[in-house]
Image (tube, rainbow, N blue to C red):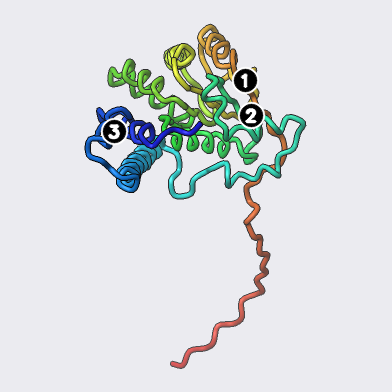
Amino acid sequence: MSDSIYEQIGRDAFYLKLDLSAEHIAKLSMNESWSDEHLQAVADIFTYMREQKEQKTISTLLRLSRLPLKEPKTFENFDFSQIRGKDMTALQELPTLAALYGHRNLAFIGPQGVGKTHLAMAFGRACCEKGYKTYFLKATELNQKLLDARKYGREKSTINGLVKPSCLIIDEIGRCVFDKVNTRMFFDIIDRRYNKEGPNTLILTSNLMPGKWGEFFSEDSSLLCSLDRIFDIATVFTIKGQTYRGKQCNTITLAAGRPSALPKQDI
């Protein structure tokens, strides 16, 4: 059964943080003898205000996410036809954001150019569009961020900032080596996200299987604890195949002959 127009207005008012319930609207409508057209006009105004606020929120979330805005990576512009396998359903269900709501982490593993980062970014963008905070950074950027935090005494605030997003994406695990302190800080981030309430997911991409990640972290115990929490509830997509990159690259072969003699100049 669909909501009454009073409930619709009340729901929009709640989103706009206005102290105005469906009951208040109904009483006001009766006291002022609003017609159906009048009441619908009020509903349309509240709907417009809610939609405007939603769009502003989404724009802010996307701007702060560090996801590309000029040429966004989305599920709509990902070529799912190029991926084959008996478990394709799991990949095709990514746009439902079930992983976010189910507190399930995601990992995309495979060679360069098969779409790992595109899928991770598309998921993050979809989270923003649903009003959930997302943050994207490469493993090298995370490593430097932790080093800077130690240098300037911002360890606590930096870790808090990486725990807060509902969707945290760490791209290209295996591109740099985390020292012992950074490995422990990485564990702190993972551990706190593991116990985080509300919709949340951690997304990792790498060219390497997780069993080889130990080469890039400098303390075995912290790494093992991190991996234990990351993959306790997770879906790992291993993608094989050739790179998509270069499909629009044209190769033009030219040949140059011996240069002709320069014309003599008049004296």
The earlier-in-sequence mark between 3 and 2 is 3
CA distance for labels 1 and 3: 56 Å
Callouts 2 and 1 close, C-beta under 8 Å = yes
Q: Residue at x 63, y 32 (%)?
A: 93
Q: Name the amino acid, label 2.
A: Ile
Tag 1 residue = 210
Q: Which mark is residue 25?
A: 3
Q: Residue furthest top?
A: 221
Label 1: which secondary element:
helix
Q: Which mark is residue 109?
A: 2
Q: Residue at x 45, y 34 (%)?
A: 130
Q: Position of residue 124 (x, y in %)?
A: 49, 34
Q: Is residue 93 above or below residue 113?
A: above
Q: Is residue 260 left or right of residue 159?
A: right
Q: Position of residue 184 (x, y in %)?
A: 45, 12
The answer to whether residue 82 is seen in the rendering is yes
Q: Name the amino acid, label 3.
A: Ile
Q: Is residue 30 above or below residue 185?
A: below
CA distance for labels 3 and 2: 53 Å
Q: Residue furthest bottom?
A: 266
Q: Residue furthest right?
A: 86
Dividing the picture into quadrants, the one containing residue 75 is top right
Q: Residue at x 22, y 39 (%)?
A: 32
Q: Position of residue 263 (x, y in %)?
A: 54, 87
Label 2: which secondary element:
strand
